[in-house]
């Protein structure tokens, strides 16, 4: 296996899939995706102590939903992306939903402030 900074030919296709899925998602799914995106794209790896509950949503013995499968793929794929790939996805998401990216940036800023100040803050809209 190569390093995480190596270019993967599949990356452009992966980004296109993520964009297509994002365009299909409603507000609730985008809200569920937000902490996952922050977790994968922010070096500190957690959002004010929040852990995505997308993986824990598997109540009873039901198979995972399409959304859960897509989130799993996103997590696996994004582990191999370099910073330029991540920036490209964020740029494309911004062109689709500016407010979503503003929430993403707000979570990143609040998370950095909480690390510096030793505080855990709750982010609200």
Image (cartoon, rainbow, N blue to C red):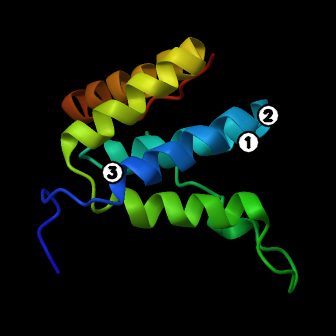
Disc marking residue 92: none
- The mark tally for this picture is 3
- The residue identified by callout 2 is 26
In which quadrant of the rendered image does the C terminus lie? top right
User: First in sequence: mark 2 or mark 3?
Assistant: 2
- Judge depth for marks 2 and 3 and give the one in front: 2
Q: Residue at x 53, y 29 (%)?
A: 122
| C-alpha separation, residue under disc 2 versus residue under disc 3 | 25 Å
In the image shown, does 1 or 34 lie closer to the viewer?
1
Instruction: Look at the numbered discs 1 and 2 and tell me whether their residues touch, using CB distance below 8 Å.
Output: yes
The reply to whether residue 9 is in sight is yes
| Callout 1 secondary element | helix
User: Crowding near pointer 1: few (<14 within 10 Å), some, many (20+)?
Assistant: some
* Residue annotated with mark 1: 29
Distance of mark 3 from mark 1, alpha carbons? Answer: 20 Å
Q: Secondary structure at mark 3?
A: loop
């Amino acid at each position: 296996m190569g390093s995480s900074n190596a270019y993967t030919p599949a990356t452009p296709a992966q980004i296109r899939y993520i964009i297509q899925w994002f365009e299909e998602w409603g507000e609730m799914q985008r809200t569920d995706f937000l902490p996952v995106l922050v977790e994968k794209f922010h070096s500190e790896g957690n959002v004010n102590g929040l852990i995505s509950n997308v993986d824990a949503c598997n109540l009873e013995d039901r198979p995972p939903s399409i959304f859960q499968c897509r989130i799993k793929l996103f997590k696996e794929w994004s582990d191999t992306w370099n910073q330029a790939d991540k920036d490209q996805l964020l740029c494309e998401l911004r062109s689709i939903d500016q407010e979503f990216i503003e929430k993403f940036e707000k979570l990143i800023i609040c998370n950095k402030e909480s690390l510096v100040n030793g505080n855990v803050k709750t982010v609200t809209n």
